[in-house]
Amino acid sequence: WFEFPQIKYYTNAFIVKDDQVLLGFKKRGFGKGKYNGFGGKVEPGESSLQAAIRELEEESGVVAPLKQAGSFLFYTQGAEWAFHIDIYTASTYEGNITETDEMRPEWFSLGQRLPKGDLALFNERQNTDAPTEAETSEEEHPGVPYENMWETDIVWLPLLFSGKKFIGRADFVQTADKFEPRKWWYGLV
Ligand code: 6OG
C-alpha cells in the first residue's frame, strides 16, 4: 500500500430504482469521460450526508433521501491527498433529472429484463415487486458500463445493489493520462 500525506472527504450517490441505476457521464474535472455516481467534496461546516444531498442535486437536479451504503479510501501514488469517499444510495427521488455542465445523467439496467411472455410465470412465482406490463415493455436500457467507470467500481457497486454495507481501499498509479489500480481490498461491515 502507498503512504499518503492527508485525507480529504468526498461523496458519491447512486439512485437505484426499478432495477435501474442512475449514473452520470462526467463531462469535466476529475474522472472526466467516465460514468460515476453524483458527488463531490465535503465543504467545511457540512456533514458528509449534507454534502452528498447537495452534490446530487447540483449535478443531477434531484433531491433524494440518501442512506450510506459504504465507504472507501482511494489514493493515487504521489497525489497530495487520499480521497475518503462516502457512498450513498436512495431508491426514491424528487425533482427532474437534469443534465448539467458537469454530468450527463443516464439510466442503466441492473439485470436482464423479463421478456413479455414470461411475465405471467414471474408473477405466479413471486408476487412482490413484480414488474408491471408497462415496465417490461418499456425501452431497454444498457447494462451498467463497468468498462467505462473507475476499474474498482465493479468490486463494490454490486454490494451496493444488493444492500450490503462495505468498506474498502483502492491504491492506483497514474501513468501518462491513465489511472491504473495496483492494490485494492473491499469487505463487508
Ligand atoms: P469532484 O471532483 O467531481 O469530486 N471519485 C471516485 N469515484 C469512484 N467510483 N471511484 C474512485 O476511485 C473515485 N475517486 C473519486 C468522488 C470527485 C468525485 O469523484 C469520485 C466524487 O464523487 C477509484 O468534485
Image (cartoon, helix red, strand yellow):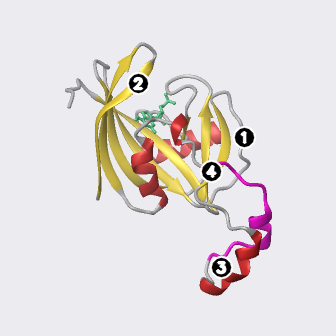
- What secondary structure is marked by label 2? strand
* Badge 2 amino acid: Phe
Task: Give the percent coordinates (x, y) of residue 61.
Answer: 67, 43
Main SS of the magenta segment?
loop
Q: Is residue 15 above or below residue 152?
A: below
Q: CA distance from mark 2 to mark 4?
A: 31 Å
> With 154 as the anchor, is 127 left or right in this view?
right
Residue at 39 percent across and 47 percent down: it is: 155
Q: Secondary structure at mark 3?
A: helix
**What is the number of the mark on residue 164?**
none
Look at the numbered disc 4 and give the secondary structure of its residue: loop
Instruction: Classify 10 Å Cα crowding around label 2: few (below 14), some (14-19), many (20 and above).
Output: some
Q: Is mark 2 within 8 Å of ligand 1?
A: yes
Between the residue at mark 4 and the residue at mark 3, the CA separation in whole angstroms equals: 33 Å
Task: Determine which residue is flagged by label 3.
Answer: 122
Residue, disc 2: 179
Q: Quadrant of residue 135?
A: bottom right
Q: Residues within 10 Å of mark 4 (few under 14, many from 20)?
A: some
CA distance separating discs 2 and 3: 43 Å
Please name the residue that numbered disc 1 is placed on: 98
- Front-lying residue, 118 or 9: 118
Name, please, the residue furthest toward the bottom: 124
Front-lying residue, 45 or 18? 18
Residue type pointed to by label 4: Val
Tell me whether circle 2 and circle 3 mark residues in contact (CB < 8 Å). Answer: no
- Of the residues under marks 1 and 3, which one precedes in the sequence? 1
- Between the residue at mark 1 and the residue at mark 2, the CA separation in whole angstroms equals 29 Å
Work out whether residue 186 can be spotted: yes
| Residue extent of the magenta highlight | 129-142
- Identify the residue under disc 4: 63
